[in-house]
Image: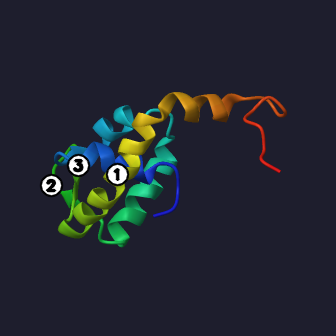
Amino acid sequence: MGGKWKPLILYHLRLGPRRFGELRRLVAGVSEKVLIQQLRELVEASVLMRRDYQEVPPKVDYAVTPFGQTLIEALMPLCAWGNAHRTQVEMNGRAPIGEGPELVR
């Protein structure tokens, strides 16, 4: 489950299937190549299922599997923590060297 994009992908799929184009718009900042790679890895891990409708133009969507739903449930407390501490996390992530929180010695 490594990588910065997989939790975001799961977050956007938690309420139901989405097509690739929707995910591309929702997961802001991810390149198409990386999104495809992350989706493939999640499918291979049985966290997502990929449904190909065999249509022209191509229509494919992704949905969370029951196994993937258990992962989402495990990640939700981490998401809640991040939302509750968003300001501090953002401040710590942007602080120049030497201007962040003091280290305890």
Residue 17: x, y in percent? 18, 48
Q: Nearer the viewer, mark 2 or mark 1?
A: 1
**Left of 30 or right of it: where is 51?**
left
Residue 70's image quarter?
bottom left
Q: Residue at x 48, y 35 (%)?
A: 85
- Mark 3 and mark 1 in contact? Answer it, CB < 8 Å: no
**Label 1 CA crowd tier, 10 Å (few <14, some 14–19, many 20+):** few
Alpha carbon of mark 2 to alpha carbon of mark 3: how far? 21 Å
Image quadrant holding the N terminus, namely bottom left
Q: Residue at x 25, y 48 (%)?
A: 13
The residue nearer to you, when weighing 99 against 33, is: 99
Q: Amino acid at mark 2?
A: Tyr
Query: What residue would you read off at disc 1?
Result: 77
- From the viewer's side, name the closer residue of 33 and 26: 26
Closer to us: 55 or 83: 83
Q: Residues within 10 Å of mark 2 (few under 14, many from 20)?
A: few
Task: Say left or right for 70 vs 28.
Answer: left
Residue underneath mark 3: 14
Residue under numbered circle 2: 53
Asked whether the residues under the numbered discs 2 and 1 touch, taking CB atoms below 8 Å apart as contact, a structural biologist would say: no
Name the amino acid, label 1: Pro
